[in-house]
Amino acid sequence: MLILMNTIISRVTVMFYGMRGLLMCMVLLMLVPTVRAESPVRVAAVSGLDLVPYEDALAGFSEACGWQVKRFFFEEGGEAVTLQKIRESNPDLILAVGRSALIRSKAFTEIPVVYVMISNPVPLVKGESNVVGVSMDMPGNELLSAFLAAYPHVQRLGIVYSSQTQHLYDDAQYAVKNAGKKLTSFKASSEAGALQSLKGLIPDVDAFWMLPDTMIWTGLNINYLFSLTQDAGIPVLAFSPKYSELGEVFAPSLDARLMGANACALGLDILSAKGTSTVLSPRR
């Protein structure tokens, strides 16, 4: 059964890695959605898929910045050819829209990269000094609070996670404890391990918390998860509404256009930090 969210959550968590984290938070609080540079900045916007949310994020970025944006898709002619085309365009900034685009954009260590429309970016960007971005993930406390408002009967939650989502699991564990609920969890190191964990976990919980873990949640595992939860009659707290058609799902609704505008603010900041002459202070 498809259950839509009664409460729409619109929250963008901006993640910034490095010593400029505090400054970045201050910048985003002060900026309005529209920020422009006096001279055009050349931006290579890269993605692996042509999806509506990706287009919305790009539109928000373009509207906020007003920079020269050239599109690149990694399906065109193969990865190596596309990477070369991006390099030949001599961009000042790379906007990576989606996970696959960010993974490939990391090849440009000398060019600032801003990512958007990505869940759980920490494993991908940790230690990358030229990469900043906007995460789709919400703080565990806020997400769980909204979920429990919609499902007040839930007392026992289950989570299967891997080393890839250890930090998100820690956040979720704290949120569950803070809410006075019980958590049953398993740490898996493979897809097969995740399947075995699910079999033992689902009968003992009232809801399942699905973390954005690409190590264990692949096509077959995702289908199996929703088959088990539907049979057990329990809801899934997911990280994206795209799973709503698979079962009873509660997930945050994200404003992709606003995320794109925030990515613009991050781009402005990282270029200014590098001393790029074409970027000036934002105008309100």
Image (spheres, rainbow, N blue to C red):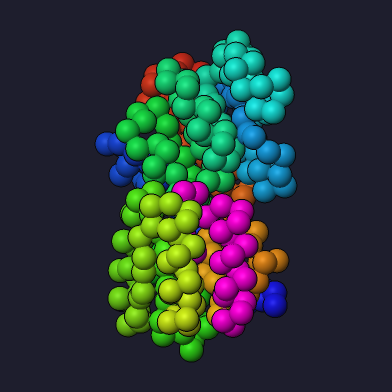
Image quadrant assignment for residue 185? bottom left
User: Where is residue 33 drawn, in percent x and y?
Assistant: 56, 45
In the picture, measured across the screen, residue 124 lies left or right of residue 253, that is: left
What is the residue that sits farthest to the top in this orientation?
Answer: 88
Residue at 71% x, 24% y is 76
Image quadrant assignment for residue 90? top right
In the figure, 11 relative to 203: above or below? above
In the picture, measured across the screen, residue 280 lies left or right of residue 24, that is: right
Residue at 53% x, 60% y is 239
Residue 185 visible, this orientation: yes
User: Where is residue 251 drawn, in percent x and y?
Assistant: 57, 66
Residue at 54% x, 72% y is 236
In the figure, 276 relative to 263: above or below? above
Assess whether residue 170 is covered by the magenta stretch: no
User: Where is residue 238 drawn, in percent x and y?
Assistant: 54, 65
Assess whether residue 222 is covered by the magenta stretch: yes
Identify the magenta region.
210-233
User: Where is residue 158 drawn, in percent x and y?
Assistant: 42, 73
